[in-house]
Amino acid sequence: MSILKIARMGHPVLRQVAQPVAPEEVSSHRIQQLIEDMLETVADADGAGLAAPQVHASVRVVILSLDALEGFQIWINPVLTPLTEDYMLTYEGCLSVEGLRGAVARPARVRVQALDRDGGAIDMELDGFSAVVAQHECDHLDGILYIDRLEPGTLMFLDEYRRFGPWPLGEYDEGDEEDFDEDIAEGGEE
Ligand code: ZN
């Protein structure tokens, strides 16, 4: 097991579309070792989730900690489908974009279909913060960072975020037609 180096914003690996894992390759040493190393890396970084491209492996593997479930979930080739047109606004952070927080609006409920680390099928529905973490991590597999989806005007340094807190919703969504959840949740590092 090893703690892997985390790619930072600007590294091209974060902008690539990651390759799917062939079902017969799930049990391979390469993928199983990657999963073990990602678990060790996210624990060391105290993160809520990690996608393989963040550790320089351009394959469709994510691990994430979800409110509703114990321990880290491991998803291979995840496919997300939004299940609602209700959006939830959350301040997100990212291990690859250190020291910043910014608000992103995402569908508040999603379906997740993936393989687990044994190659078994996962099919579940998530809502709230778990749905947000799932979308943040799966975006990494398509080369998308949360800063690409920011609500304008919400990006903050972490120190200032802690000092001044998330801005009230009305401060920046005036006139916005999207129907945000009224709660502004604080995201972890993902
Ligand atoms: Zn991230």
Image (cartoon, rainbow, N blue to C red):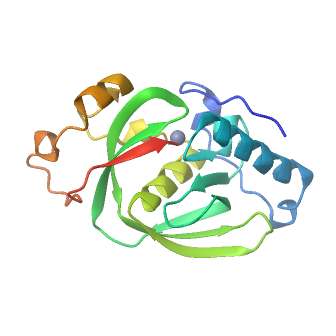
- Residue 85 lies, in percent from the top left, at 29, 68
| Residue at screen point 43% across, 41% down | 146
Residue 127 location, quadrant = bottom left
Vertical position of residue 160 compared to residue 1: above or below: above
| Residue at screen point 39% across, 73% down | 83
Q: Is residue 38 left or right of residue 17?
A: right
Image quarter where the N terminus lies is top right
Vertical position of residue 36 compared to residue 125: above or below: above
Vertical position of residue 38 compared to residue 85: above or below: above
Residue ranking furthest to the left: 175
- Residue 96 lies, in percent from the top left, at 55, 31
| Residue at screen point 48% across, 39% down | 145
Number of marks drawn: 0
The one nearer the camera, 46 or 98, is 46
| Residue at screen point 40% across, 36% down | 147
Residue 82 location, quadrant = bottom left
Residue 11 location, quadrant = top right
Q: Is residue 84 left or right of residue 17?
A: left
Vertical position of residue 5 compared to residue 85: above or below: above
- Residue 3 lies, in percent from the top left, at 76, 33
Residue ranking furthest to the right: 29
